[in-house]
Image (tube, rainbow, N blue to C red):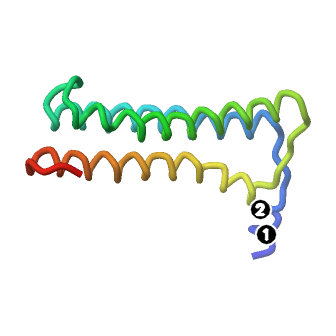
Amino acid sequence: MNETANILQSVVSTQTIMTEVVFYAVPSLLILLFMDWYAAKKIGNRMALGYRILRVPKFVSLSIICGFTVVIGLLCMYTDLTVTRGTLTYFGLPYFIALVYYLVKMLRRVKAETKGRRL
């Protein structure tokens, strides 16, 4: 138990922070693009009104993902940002929130479009 506590309290450098942030950002973007492709396939085409409504949630999700990555990148570049490993685990939370937000919006829109009603 003491060894686990020591691992969580160890300090990580800026290179480790940026590596982990990139490992969160790239898969998040790929998953978001896959969900966008799925929505376009299910709704019909990218020019349909139902798909165009998804532009705002997609923009919000992309802004969260890219914005958090840029902010952490700038903090790592211009300051000597160090955090504990326990805190570093929470850096994936904005990426998860952005993906869940777009997933919920996308699935609701696809369901509404395939059933023929409007949300």
- Percent across and percent down for residue 15 are 77, 33
Q: Quadrant of the N terminus?
A: bottom right
- Percent across and percent down for residue 117 are 12, 51
Left/right placement of residue 92 relative to residue 41 reads right
Q: Residue furthest bottom?
A: 1
Q: How far is the residue under mark 2 from the one under mark 1?
A: 5 Å
Residue shown at 82%/50% (left/top)?
83
Residue shown at 66%/49% (left/top)?
91
- Percent across and percent down for residue 9 are 83, 61
Residue position marked by numbered label 2 in the rendering: 8
- Crowding around mark 1 (Cα neighbors within 10 Å: few <14, some 14 to 19, many 20+) is few
Q: Amino acid at mark 2?
A: Leu
Q: In the picture shown, does residue 90 fall above or below 16? A: below
Q: Nearer the viewer, residue 10 or 31?
A: 31
Q: Amino acid at mark 1?
A: Ala
Left/right placement of residue 104 relative to residue 3 reads left
Residue shown at 52%/32% (left/top)?
26
Q: Secondary structure at mark 2?
A: helix
Q: In the picture shown, does residue 5 fall above or below 13? A: below
Q: Residue furthest right?
A: 80
**Numbered mark located on residue 5 in the image:** 1
Q: Nearer the viewer, residue 29 or 111?
A: 111
Residue shown at 74%/38% (left/top)?
16
**Numbered mark located on residue 53 in the image:** none
Quadrant in the picture for residue 65: top right
Q: Residue furthest top?
A: 47
Q: Nearer the viewer, residue 95 or 84?
A: 95
- Percent across and percent down for residue 52 are 29, 31
Q: Secondary structure at mark 1?
A: helix
Q: Check whether the beta carbons of the residues at disc 2 and disc 1 lie within 8 A of each other.
A: yes
- Crowding around mark 2 (Cα neighbors within 10 Å: few <14, some 14 to 19, many 20+) is some
